[in-house]
């Protein structure tokens, strides 16, 4: 007796595999979008902590966010440091409720922020992650 699979059995198996993939792929895609948004938000938080540390060391520093290009950097003594292109690194867009202008979050010598409260939203696909910054520089996820 010969052993093996028939063409009908292979077709049924591949059909079931295709059905499972059709059901699972959108969820995997949304999960990847969510993880990219969270990673980009954490990159923003990391830049804010670097700016706070630089401010206590040098007297003042700021985090600058450019929603148009999705770039964020730390500015110390007028020079950009620690620049990250969020669109290139994570494939996200940055949204700010005020519009597409530079968002500048300065910190003083004590590491306290001096700016109006702001919410920056990082989005990719249908997923979003918000970062709220209070007027004293506290960050809320």
Image (cartoon, rainbow, N blue to C red):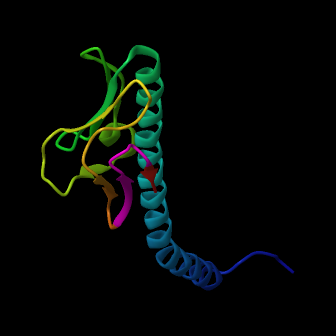
- In the visual, does 126 lie left or right of 4? left
Quadrant (top left, top right, bottom left, bottom right) of the N terminus: bottom right
- The percent coordinates of residue 62 (x first, y second) are 31, 29
- Look at 33% across and 57% down and name the residue there: 124
- The percent coordinates of residue 30 (x first, y second) are 44, 66
Magenta range is 127-138
The image quadrant that residue 5 belongs to is bottom right
Would you place residue 96 above or below residue 109 in this image?
below
Task: Between residue 29 and residue 96, name the one nearer to us.
Answer: 96
Task: Between residue 127 and residue 9, name the one nearer to us.
Answer: 127
Task: Between residue 103 and residue 16, name the one nearer to us.
Answer: 103
- The percent coordinates of residue 74 (x first, y second) are 34, 26
Task: Between residue 115 and residue 54, name the one nearer to us.
Answer: 115
- In the visual, does 44 lie left or right of 85? right
- Membership of 133 in magenta stretch: yes
- Look at 66% across and 81% down and name the residue there: 6
The image quadrant that residue 115 belongs to is top left
- Membership of 97 in magenta stretch: no
- In the visual, does 12 lie left or right of 45? right
- The percent coordinates of residue 4 (x first, y second) are 76, 75
- Look at 42% across and 59% down and name the residue there: 33
Would you place residue 74 above or below residue 3 in this image?
above
């Amino acid at each position: 007796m010969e052993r093996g699979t028939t063409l009908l059995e292979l077709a049924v198996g591949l059909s079931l595999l295709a059905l499972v993939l059709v059901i699972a792929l959108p969820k995997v895609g949304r999960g990847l979008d969510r993880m990219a948004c969270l990673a980009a938000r954490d990159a923003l938080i990391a830049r804010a902590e670097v700016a706070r540390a630089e401010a206590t060391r040098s007297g003042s520093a700021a985090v600058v966010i450019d929603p148009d290009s999705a770039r964020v950097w730390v500015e110390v003594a007028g020079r950009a440091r620690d620049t990250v292109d969020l669109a290139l690194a994570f494939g996200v867009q940055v949204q700010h409720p005020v519009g597409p202008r530079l968002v500048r979050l300065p910190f003083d010598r004590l590491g306290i922020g001096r700016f109006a409260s702001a919410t920056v939203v990082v989005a990719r696909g249908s997923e979003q992650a918000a970062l709220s910054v209070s007027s004293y520089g506290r960050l809320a996820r």
